[in-house]
Image (spheres, helix red, strand yellow):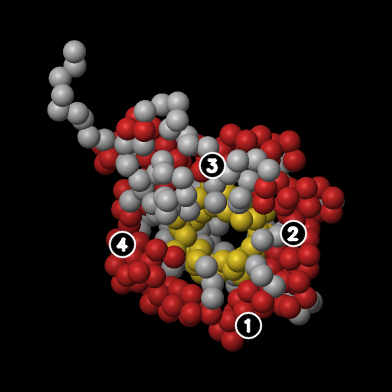
Amino acid sequence: MPERFDNPGSMIPLSWSDPSGSRSAERQRKGLTMVIDKGAGISAFRDLLELASPYIDICKLGFGTAALYPTAQLRQKLELAKAYGLQIMPGGTFFEIALLSTPVSQYMETMCQLGFTAVEISDGTFPLSQKERREAIMSGLACGLTVYTEFGKKDANYRAEKEELLQTLAADLDAGASHVIVEARESGTVGVFDRNGNIDQQFVQDVTDAAKEMGTRLIWEAPKKEQQVHLIQTLGSNVHLGNIAYSDVLSVETLRRGLRGDTAARFAQRSAAPCE
C-alpha cells in the first residue's frame, strides 16, 4: 500500500515549506481539500495521487460521471483512492437523479458495494424535504459511508441565504453528516459568488461567526484562484475548500501555506537575524 503522507518538508527546511506554520505536520492540519474529478483516466489519476495525495482529502467524481465508467475501471479508481487514504464519492447530481427512480437505501447499498467510501447528498436540481434529507444521511451512515451534504441550488440566479444555511448546517450535522458543502458549481458562480465569480466575503465571515464551532464543518466550493485566495485571507489557511481542479492541487496548497505572492504577506515572518 502506498504511504499516505511522506513528510513534504523532509528535503526542504520546514520554515521554508510552510510559512503558515499549520500545514506540514502530517494529518494534524485541519483544512480539507476536495478535488473534483470530471472523468480523468486511471493513469492521470495515479499520477495525481503519486504527486499530490498528501494535499488531497476527498475526491468527488463530479456530476453523474460515475455512471459512465466501465465497472472495472471505476473499481480500480476507487481502490487507488482508498490505497492513498482518500475519501472518494460520486457527485450529488448522480444521487439526485438516482432517487427519481430508486429507493435511497438501494442507492447507498450500491455505492458501498462498488467501493465508494463516501457519498454526497444534495438537492441542487431536484428538491428534498427535510425528512427525506435526514433519511438519506442516516441511510448512508447505515451502509458505513461518510456522508457529505451540500447546501445550495444550481440555478444561475441562486444566492445563499444566511439563516437557511445555518439551519441546514445544524440539521445535517445533527443527523450525522460529516461536513456540509456550500454549493458554487464547477463554474464558481452561485451561492456566495455572483455571476462573475466575485465572493461575498462579509457573508462568509458572518456565517462563520454565527455558526461558531459548527463553522469548522463547512466546505466552501471555490474552483477559481481568486475565490481560494479570498477564502484563505478571510478564514485562514485551514479553511475547507472544494471543487479544486486536478491541476490546481499544489497551487492551492501553496496558497494555504503562504508560498505564493497572493497570501505570502499573511503568513511570512522575516527573521531578525542578519545575513552572514
The residue depicted at 74 percent of the width and 65 percent of the height is: 111
Residue carrying label 2: 115
Q: Give the residue type that dot 4 points to.
A: Gln
Q: Is residue 257 left or right of residue 83?
A: left
Verify CB contact (< 8 Å) between mark 1 and mark 4: no
Q: Earlier in the sequence, mark 1 or mark 4?
A: 1
Q: Earlier in the sequence, mark 2 or mark 1?
A: 2
Report the mark closest to the observer, 4 or 3. Answer: 3
Q: Return the x and y of residue 173 as percentages of the image width and height.
A: 48, 75
Verify CB contact (< 8 Å) between mark 2 and mark 1: no
Residue carrying label 4: 205
Marks 1/3: CA–CA distance: 35 Å
Marks 1/4: CA–CA distance: 31 Å
Marks 4/3: CA–CA distance: 32 Å
State which quadrant residue 42 falls in: top right
Q: Is residue 65 left or right of residue 30?
A: right
Residue carrying label 1: 135
